Amino acid sequence: MIEQAAIDAHGLSAEEYRRLVEILGREPTITELGIFSVMWSEHCSYKSSRRHLRRFPTDGPRVLQGPGENAGAVDVGDGLAAVFKIESHNHPSFIEPYQGAATGVGGIIRDIFTMGARPIALLDSLRFGALEDGRGGTRADTARLVDGVVAGIAGYGNSIGIPTVGGEVAFEPRYAGNPLVNVFCLGVAEAGRLAKGVASGTGNPVYYVGAKTGRDGIHGATMASAEFDDRSADNRPAVQVGDPFMEKLLLEACLEVMETDALVGIQDMGAAGLTCSTCEMAARGGTGIDIDVSRVPRRETGMTPYEIMLSESQERMLLVVRRGREAEVERIFDKWDLHAVRIGEVTGDGLLRVRDRGGVVAEIPNRELADAAPLYDRPTRRPAYLDEAQRLDASALSAPVDLTRTWLDLLAAPVIASKRWIYRQYDHMVRTNTVALPGLGAAVVRIKGTGRALAMSVDGNGRHAWLDPREGGRLAVAEAARNVACAGAEPIGATNCLNFGNPERPDIMWQFVEAVDGIAEGCRALGIPITGGNVSLYNETDGQAIDPTPVIGVVGLLEDAGRVLTRLFPAAGLDVILLGDSAPAAAGADGLGGSEYLKRVHRLVRGRPAAVDFDRERALQRLMVDAARRGMVCSAHDCAEGGLAVALAECCIESGGGGARVDLPGPGGPDDGFGAVRTLFGESPSRVIVSAAPEGRAGLLVLARDRGVPAAVIGRTGGDRVTVSVAGGVVADVALDAAERAWTTGLARHFEPAAVRQ
Amino acid sequence: MRTRVFVTLKPSVFDPQGRTIVEALGSMGYGAVRDVRQGKYFELDVDAETPEAARALATEVADRLLANPVIESYQVEVDGETPQAPPAEPGRLPAKPARLVDA
Amino acid sequence: MRTRVFVTLKPSVFDPQGRTIVEALGSMGYGAVRDVRQGKYFELDVDAETPEAARALATEVADRLLANPVIESYQVEVDGETPQAPPAEPGRLPAKPARLVDA
Amino acid sequence: MKFAIIQFPGSNCDHDAYHAVRHVLGRQAEFVWHKDSDLRGADAVVLPGGFSYGDYLRTGAIARFSPVMQRVKAFADAGGPVIGICNGFQVLLEAGLLEGALLRNRRLKFLCQHVHVRVEETDTPFSRGAAAGQVLKLPIAHGEGNFHASPETVDALEANRQIVFRYCDAEGAATDAANPNGSLRRIAGVCNRRRNVVGLMPHPERACESALGSEDGRVVLESVVTAMAATGAA
Ligand SMILES: Nc1ncnc2c1ncn2[C@@H]1O[C@H](COP(=O)(O)OP(=O)(O)O)[C@@H](O)[C@H]1O
Ligand SMILES: [Mg+2]
């Protein structure tokens, strides 16, 4: 008989417990209770989010694997598939930055090679508290978190030999008590040979391989679904030490096993470890699975079946092998000094049967366990703060007198400044595929053996989403896809990581639903299918929720790897062309709402982020891809945080082209004093700065006209200054080396001297 | 004053390095080494009047910087200080660290 | 038998980790910590009859694998073993390691 | 002309070396597993970069005991050309085929970036194709590339002209700013007395195609091809 206390301790509601008893037709054993509690946790069951995620567009001609498997997959030609997914490891990274981030990297890599793909690229999307003022936590705390997280990603990714080729990072007060660590991984597989996490074929043996099982992260899965409070210190034993060396062996050995046809199914043991992998594989196969925990290799003595089933020890895989092919598989693992252990077999009875030295300790119908988790339609309410927050009256502000100083100040903003301090700690060149180095725009890796390359970008602006969750979702899709298109790649697939607060709060749930709809709208409008993703809820500390943060990862295909574009003006004397609207709105707050300018200069997070017009956005992106294919442009960079002026400076910094001098049309109408500010720093989307040689220029302008994309030649590259005039009058003018200094030191200066705790 | 700080992973925490070293030793024919745990060792030169003051400072430093209390324990030793119980035999560390801080 | 091996960089070798720690401590207001040297600390569980046998094995292992004689020195300690000269005061390591191999 | 590329558990630049040799230089290359006890009749041996045994304990410390290292040693003793890149360099030092050691980078952080090195000696099989003083743009990617040796040893290395590559700036000038990791006398790569074994921290195999930002690494691998051609193996 299970007491109420035990049920509560396992975070099961009365209704959930009733459902559980109904499924079993009896009271559960303590092991069964534990199994249900992790499988029905938010983390594993998506019980708050699932019904909403169904609104994502998930199919398209290239989709080979949509949501539901360990990762999604799209066809990239030559019989190859790009397999990719993004995962969060937020809570563990807050508790122990280095190990939390490191094991997060390990987890997403397993998801990719589990699909039979060779991982070739990692990207990281990071959010931390403010670096520049102590709001919500001291600068030192934040710096230590950043240092630990970056070192952890480097420590794992560099060791296993998968390049971290890009990412993004932002600093906002609301992440101080709950940083975000989202990691994206992409691999390449033979399209016809994607592996599945399925257990089929009654009598086929079930193998366990990898690290020994310890008492790691027991209830880690439920921890990742519970708000932080002071008691979260008690969760500390849930911290795990990653072992990239073990995972490297697993990666190579598993890919070698997949070369043979001895493998039926494979799944990594992530959240909810052995429990999740066994019941999900069997549920997918419509089979049962029968294992004996006494055969599971253990690191510690006296572990109970409960602990073995719930352990989240890292670097472990579960395999179903064709009967009769055991020796072959065991030989491959032996070669890699891994010891594959047979712990059970596939059955036909649809049950997850767990034994301990033969005796049955749990017996649960798989399908119900995996798929019958209660789904919630949580109530939503538009947050009270929105009306006030969205109101922005520019006329109440005083425009800065010296726009050049504002420009330099923005270039030094941590979110805009060079991220070199971060990515040079990552081996971003290993595997010799990186054809666009980090810092130059979207990440681009070539696919050896083909002429093609894949471009990737992860983006999401929590400030935009806080001010308007739906638009925030739309903007994230638009920016990620635009970044990829600016590299010359056609966006072909997307993944997403939804980081939000406590979904049991209607205002948070509203943010979530709005953001999901925004992402769905954006992906539909641009024809980009979503092939998978991850939801991270309960990102709160002491009742303080993070900014709602939908992060979108978009993958694009370059037919000709040789035609990849970066932000850099390659030479002096090129035309500088602005694609998209060049004239800012006459007055009002357009482009200023939620902008970096407003935050930095006026210390305001207000207004509505400028809305995306997806007809314009689609036309712009298609134009970019075609122009790149036809070699019409020499470089491309989208206007994001900091607007056109910052983007222009970034095209010049560290480029071969020197500076630039551009002239922009003035606001069409009476100037409210913010005309120049909007022109320089406004963040209205769907704008790209390209450079072109005279030959390319003519063709580009024609093509743009045919496509209905506004295109204006606004200036020329060259010289040692970057100068912007509006309607003929110089409004900002900076020496290139000064701009370079501000931009290169803006982030790094917060981390010198080299940080603490080695 | 010479002060030593030993930092070790908490017993419950997995030590991949130690495991890899044991396996390497095994294949080198040193099967007699049954287990290895790797930790960090710091020698501090502390400007302090008394061993007690040195210990206090080193303990604070270990706690704040040298050790990661989430996964590590540490132990402090000061030259010329008589250790706390259990009394140690000459020339060796107490079998159980004198002051095991298990934050 | 529990055996400990301490591996330290030779005094002549620059220790970037130690240096960084001292600087960090300085900026944290711990100027009283004049110097820090970081080393490695190993706990070995050795299957041996006598402390002497354990020491012999640990020494061989330290010499062949745990330490790199080009840059490091090591010192071995065995539970329940009386250390070699110089005789140490109770409860602390000999000021100069008992058997400093300085290859 | 055939290259043997040694694979240790945790090697992760093995395929990069293979790609450079096989698909860029168009030479034969074969992987040799660390438990193998023959080098497949290769004319040159590459110890690739990576994290053999996870870099646990010390970089290269465990790999040095792999069975194949006996063969590599015999091959080197017989005068065969051997190159260790990054982790491969660390293994060669631990194995005593080269003199010195590599400490943590002076700023402690792992560094992945392009650097410049000057070719100091051109009478090794991995530098003979270069001009004396030629400046190469090569990537580094390491956390422990800070070369160290006793003063006597370094003096001997200098005296015997065993310092093959030194960090420098783009113009070849010897500046401290150009020394990414604090290496003694800006040493990026050395050879043994017999000059047939070379180790370096930068990654020539990552710099063999313009698409990757530099082709300067080719000369290192091509040198050994011409060197072997000279000895008749081709
Ligand atoms: N955390 C990070 N890790 C690796 N690379 C990063 C990271 N943050 C930013 N970068 C790189 O820096 C460049 C600029 O990033 P970002 O400002 O987000 O560009 P954009 O505004 O075009 O999205 C990109 O190439 C990106 O890959
Ligand atoms: Mg961005």
Image: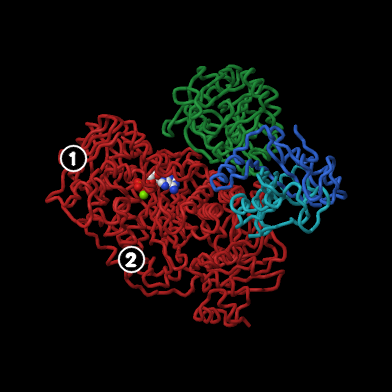
Chain colours: A red, B cyan, C blue, D green
Circle 1 — which element?
Answer: helix
Looking at the image, residue A612 sits to the left or right of residue A162; the answer is: left
Which numbered disc, 1 or 2, marks the residue that appears first in the sequence? 2
Query: Mark 1 and 2 residues: CB-CB less than 8 Å, in contact?
Result: no
Give me the chain letter of mark 1.
A
Query: Looking at the image, which residue is at 66% across and 73% down?
Result: A361
Q: Position of residue A428 (x, y in %)?
A: 47, 41
Label 1 vs label 2: CA separation?
39 Å
Q: Nearer the viewer, residue A281 or A692?
A: A692
Residue A62 vertical placement versus A272 (above, below): above
- Nearer-the-camera pick, C12 or C89: C89
Which residue is labeled 1 in the image?
A: A702
Q: Residue at x 33, y 55 (%)?
A: A477
Q: Residue at x 78, y 55 (%)?
A: B95
Q: Is residue A467 visible?
A: yes
Which of the chains bears the disc numbered 2? Answer: A
> Which disc number belongs to residue A514?
2
Disc 2 crowd, CA 10 A, few/some/many (<14, 14-19, 20+):
many
Q: Is residue A574 left or right of residue D129?
A: left
- The location of residue A82, given as percent across then percent down, is 43, 49
Kind of residue indicated by mark 1: Val
